[in-house]
Amino acid sequence: MEYRRLGKSGLKLSALSFGSWVTFKNQIDTQLAEQCIGTAYDAGVNFFDNAETYANGDSELIMGKALRNLGFSRDSFCVSSKVFFGSHTHPKPTQHGLSHKHILEACHQALQRLQVDYLDLYFCHRPDPETPVEETVRAMHALVQQGKVLYWGTSEWSAEEIGAAHRVARELYLTPPAMEQPQYNLFVRERVEQEYAPLYRDYGMGTTIWSPLASGVLTGKYSRGIPKDSRLNLPGYEWLKERLQSEDGRRRVVAVEQLTVIARELGMSPTQLALAWCLKNPHVSSVILGASRVEQLRENLGALAQVPKLTSEVMLRLATAAN
């Protein structure tokens, strides 16, 4: 396993990490979660990603039980949560958003579900236009001061919003955000590669990448339709199916056929190709894997060994095919 610093911080995360979005509870029970987390850990993965809203908190419960059963030393792994959407299907006004109240209570709830004393990483899952950024930064700073959170960051915030949080932190001598969790893959590139460029330079921002496989599209499994056991057929994820069936979605499926040809030429799977492509970006701290089977996870973990094959010529071919 390769380990990368989280931006300019001293924390080293495994280049490939393991997350629970969609899979935990919906496709994975505690026993299988334990097997997947154990497999990832044995391969050198030291970062496990979660959020209050995943399966309405049940995802964190499953991960917490699995980590407890596996008995890893707490100083050998990192675990995260995210706050914004809440852990209820229909949250009350104080049960979502980025108010000081919800940030504090959501953190306590995540600690209980994950069965840990502190969160290594804590993300503001989306920007909250109804809460002053100063309030959010103060709340995160308080959690850091209390030892309940080690590093805080954002997810799907604009560069302008992240910059505003840094300015508030600097002016008030508060803890600034250390990382962002953006979507990044061969089809979604602009924000990570262009919009965030000043943030890497000015603040040393780290990134933990979600959806490196474009919700499974880059694996090639949707080239002949939607499999029955696909996440696109899960209740609550109809929006993913609609996206795939849109004109842009169909264009992406065609592009994957060209990417698959390149993958075969290089002696790797389309999945490994897509993950290796993400890992080539020096501003990527960790790429979050999502798998519903141990075999699938092992294939994903093999992507790291494929990175050297992605020469500048191959990268240009991939960019052309994806566009």
Image (spheres, helix red, strand yellow):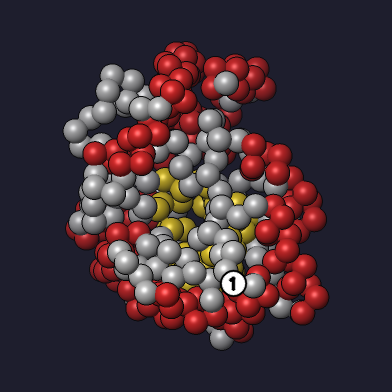
- Please, what secondary structure does the residue beneath circle 1 have? loop
Q: Residue furthest bottom?
A: 146
- How many numbered tags mark residues here? 1
In-image side of 208 versus 242 (left or right)? right
User: Is 143 above or below relative to 155?
Assistant: below
The residue beneath circle 1 is 131
Picture quadrant of residue 96: bottom left
Q: Where residue 187 sits: x, y (%)?
A: 53, 30
Residue found 67% across the figure and 39% down from its top: 193
Relative placement, left or right, of 107 versus 144 is left
Q: Quadrant of the C terminus?
A: top right
51 or 67: which is nearer to us?
A: 51
Q: Is residue 111 left or right of residue 70?
A: right
The one nearer the camera, 233 or 81, is 233
Place of residue 270 in the rendered image (x, y in percent of width and height, measured from the top left)? 42, 25
Q: Residue at x 73, y 73 (%)?
A: 169
Left or right of 158 on screen, residue 292: left
Please name whichever residue, 62 or 254, is drawn nearer the observer in this view of the structure.
Answer: 254
Q: At x 80% / y 75%, what residue is drawn?
A: 171
**In the rendered view, would you say 273 is above or below 173?**
above
